[in-house]
Image: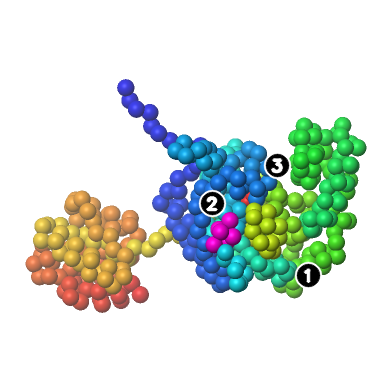
């Protein structure tokens, strides 16, 4: 009986070498960009206590209600969850290690996130985020910094038509007042609510505003506005952010319906969206979460952050027609005969001493078939060693783009090659 072939878990993707080149390039661009704003790397575990996400993200959110990979550790009964996002873990780590003790922190992380969703283009069960968090900063200057950062990254990635949606959720008291008015309003019109909205009416009425149900759009449009409840400090904060964005010519659209799917946000929230990835058009999202540190047991401190979906970003990069970058190979070593093979391996190591990227042919074959492989490898030159060369402690250099072949001693190989490679 033949064994069935094992497949990866649905919605969890392999990134094969060809595509991984693009990821490596992206990660390099992102790292340089983050460091240019003084953000520092932090690395958290992939698994956290389930209670952390329940408390931070909120019990009545899509993520906690239906998207988390939670399980009981069969060895000790602990309730654990594969992280669905990074902010909760990051804040947990900052509190656990007292990082805000004497200075605010600008931090970033990147890696896999896990959500049990229906897999489709731009929506996977294992996906990657780059997350950026600034903790201990209260003013709108940090909100502006993070939005300007994003704009600069889109520029570096060559992305066009990504637009900024902005909103403010105000502070806790204004949200309480608004919530009460919303519940009263939707109760009055409860006949028009769908099942999901009925269910959310008392637990998370704000999420009803996010509904895509066409039958409810009119009702939603006429609902009480949070904007009408905002207190002066929150309004001023929002105004100051907008002023800085205008000063930098960052276009934005204020979208009063932008509420975000996580409970911890207050004041500024934003999303960068594109119309070119179908329904999964949000490539980056974030906001302020001034209440979160206290909510998960720490001393209160203001904070602001955002996360980008790497799969969606890279899909957009490719959509914009960027050629797939490829790691460059300098030298392909072709060799035949026992003495030549021994010299080949010595020469390969000698070239790597000069920081060259060298692929030594393995597996034998005729000169002709080896040269074919050298051609396909993208190497700039082939270094060819036959018994003839080996006996003289020499090699032949063959430029792959055409040009004359020349023979040099092994001793002078590195300096001669530099002329071809610079
Ligand atoms: P969506 O509305 O698309 O479900 P979200 O509000 O759940 O997004 P966030 O929790 O804000 O997303 O995560 C930030 C970013 O991570 C998103 O803007 C998106 O680019 C990306 N992202 C979220 N969920 C997925 C997923 N399942 N697969 C791929 N990328 C994702
Ligand atoms: Mg989601």
Question: Residue 411 appears in which quarter of the rendering?
Answer: bottom left
Which residue appears farthest toward the right when viewing the image? 188
Question: Residue 105 appears in which quarter of the rendering?
Answer: bottom right
Report helix, strand or loop for mark 3: loop
Provide residue 135's location: percent of width, then percent of height: 64, 65
- The crowding category of the residue bearing disc 3, from other C-alpha atoms within 10 Å (few below 14, some 14 to 19, many at least 20), is some
Q: Which of marks 2 and 3 is nearer the N terminus?
A: 3
Q: Which of marks 2 and 1 is nearer the N terminus?
A: 2
Q: How far apart are marks 1 and 3 (CA)?
A: 32 Å
Q: Mark 1 points at which residue?
A: 240
Q: Is residue 103 visible?
A: yes
Provide residue 342's location: percent of width, then percent of height: 14, 61
Position of residue 4 relative to residue 137, above or below, is: above
Which residue appears farthest toward the top when viewing the image? 1
The structure residue drawn at horizontal position 52% and vertical position 62%, both measured from the top left corner, is: 42
Q: Main secondary structure of the magenta part?
A: helix
Position of residue 406 relative to residue 164, above or below, is: below
Q: How far apart are marks 2 and 1 (CA)?
A: 32 Å
**Bounds of the magenta segment:** 92-97
Q: Is residue 148 visible?
A: no
Left or right? Give the position of 5 relative to 88: left
Position of residue 332 relative to residue 51, above or below, is: below
The structure residue drawn at horizontal position 75% and vertical position 51%, both measured from the top left corner, is: 259
Report helix, strand or loop for mark 1: helix
Q: Mark 3 points at which residue?
A: 60
- The crowding category of the residue bearing disc 1, from other C-alpha atoms within 10 Å (few below 14, some 14 to 19, many at least 20), is some
Q: Name the residue under label 2.
A: 128
- The crowding category of the residue bearing disc 2, from other C-alpha atoms within 10 Å (few below 14, some 14 to 19, many at least 20), is some
Provide residue 362's location: percent of width, then percent of height: 22, 53
């Amino acid at each position: 009986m033949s064994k069935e072939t094992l497949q990866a878990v649905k919605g969890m993707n392999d990134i094969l070498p060809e595509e991984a080149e693009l990821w490596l390039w992206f990660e390099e661009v992102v790292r340089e960009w983050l460091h240019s704003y003084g953000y520092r790397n932090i690395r958290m575990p992939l698994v956290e206590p389930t209670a952390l996400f329940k408390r931070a993200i909120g019990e009545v959110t899509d993520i906690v209600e239906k998207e988390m990979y939670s399980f009981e550790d069969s060895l000790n009964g602990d309730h654990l969850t594969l992280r669905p996002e990074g902010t909760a873990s990051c804040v947990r780590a900052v509190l656990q290690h007292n990082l805000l003790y004497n200075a605010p922190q600008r931090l970033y992380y990147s890696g896999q996130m896990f959500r049990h969703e229906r897999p489709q283009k731009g929506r996977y069960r294992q996906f990657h985020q780059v997350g950026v968090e600034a903790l201990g900063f209260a003013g709108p200057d940090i909100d502006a910094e993070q939005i300007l950062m994003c704009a600069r990254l889109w520029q570096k990635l060559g992305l066009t038509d990504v637009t900024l949606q902005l909103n403010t959720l105000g502070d806790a008291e204004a949200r309480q007042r608004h919530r009460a008015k919303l519940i009263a309003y939707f109760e009055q019109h409860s006949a028009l609510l769908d099942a999901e909205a009925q269910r959310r009416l008392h637990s998370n009425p704000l999420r009803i505003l996010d509904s895509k149900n066409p039958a409810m759009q009119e009702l939603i449009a006429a609902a009480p506005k949070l904007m009408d409840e905002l207190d002066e400090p929150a309004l001023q904060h929002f105004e100051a952010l907008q002023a800085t964005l205008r000063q930098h010519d960052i276009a934005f659209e204020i979208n009063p319906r932008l509420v975000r799917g996580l409970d911890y946000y207050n004041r500024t929230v934003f999303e960068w969206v594109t119309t070119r990835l179908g329904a999964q058009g949000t490539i980056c999202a974030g906001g302020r979460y001034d209440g979160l540190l206290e909510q998960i047991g720490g001393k209160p401190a203001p904070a602001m952050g955002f996360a980008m979906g790497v799969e969606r970003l890279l899909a957009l990069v490719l959509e914009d027609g960027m050629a797939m970058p490829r790691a460059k190979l300098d030298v392909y070593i072709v060799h035949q005969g026992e003495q030549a093979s021994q010299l080949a391996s010595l020469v390969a190591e000698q070239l790597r001493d000069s920081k060259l990227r060298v692929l030594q042919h393995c597996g034998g074959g005729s000169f002709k078939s080896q040269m074919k492989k050298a051609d396909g490898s993208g190497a700039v030159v082939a270094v060819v060693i036959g018994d003839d060369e080996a006996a003289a402690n020499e090699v032949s250099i063959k430029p792959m783009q055409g040009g004359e072949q020349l023979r040099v001693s092994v001793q002078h190989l590195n300096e001669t090659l530099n002329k071809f490679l610079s």
